[in-house]
Amino acid sequence: MMAGATAVAVALSTAPCAQAAPKPWNGRYQFVTYASQKAGTSPAARQKENDFGAAFMLSTACSVTKCVATVVDGPAPGNPTIPQPTRYTWNGSEWATTYDWLWDCALGTSGQKQWAPATSWAYYGPQPDGSLRGTWHTDIADGPCRGNVVMPVAAFPG
């Protein structure tokens, strides 16, 4: 009877990741940030910007307590203060990442920029078609772009 109880305990201890993330986030995905749809309280939210994206390769590793999808290949970000590699942790319903960096605030039409401390978090929720959709939110701590910027994001397999 004890051996059966041990088997059940082992099965239950590995279940959270399996139940929380039934499909690992593996393979090549085209990420899109819909900057043309940004909103928020920062003056940067009102600056016109085109949508942008790139292809990234992800690999998921799960432990007993969590699953983490890591970007293992793809272009480096244009902003060198964004921590690399990007890692997304499964929270039970979506893949999430949080990081501190420096926002490069554009100052008018001169092309000059001012750097300001910022914190971002992004969420990607799996969709029935195999894509992931969510939101990227950034809080900019100070400077002329102080406030927040929110943009829809998506990742498409292939």
Image (cartoon, grey):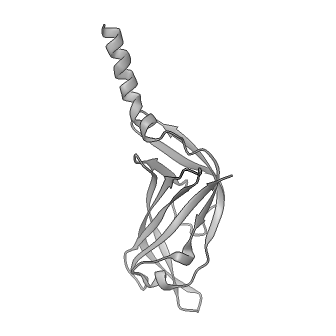
Q: How many discs appear?
A: 0
Residue 15 location (% of width, % of height): 40, 31
Residue 62 location (% of width, % of height): 48, 37
Which residue is pictured at 45% across the width and 34% down the height?
18
Which residue is pictured at 56% across the width and 61% down the height?
154
- Is 26 above or below relative to 151? above
Left or right of 148? Residue 79 is right
Which residue is pictured at 38% across the width and 22% down the height?
10
- Is 95 above or below relative to 82? above
Quadrant in the picture for residue 155: bottom right
Quadrant in the picture for residue 40: bottom left
Q: Nearer the viewer, residue 48 or 146?
A: 48
Residue 22 location (% of width, % of height): 49, 39
The furthest residue to the front = 128
The furthest residue to the right = 158
Quadrant containing the N terminus is: top left
Left or right of 136? Residue 59 is right
- Is 134 above or below relative to 126? below
Q: Nearer the viewer, residue 90 or 98?
A: 90
Residue 19 location (% of width, % of height): 43, 36
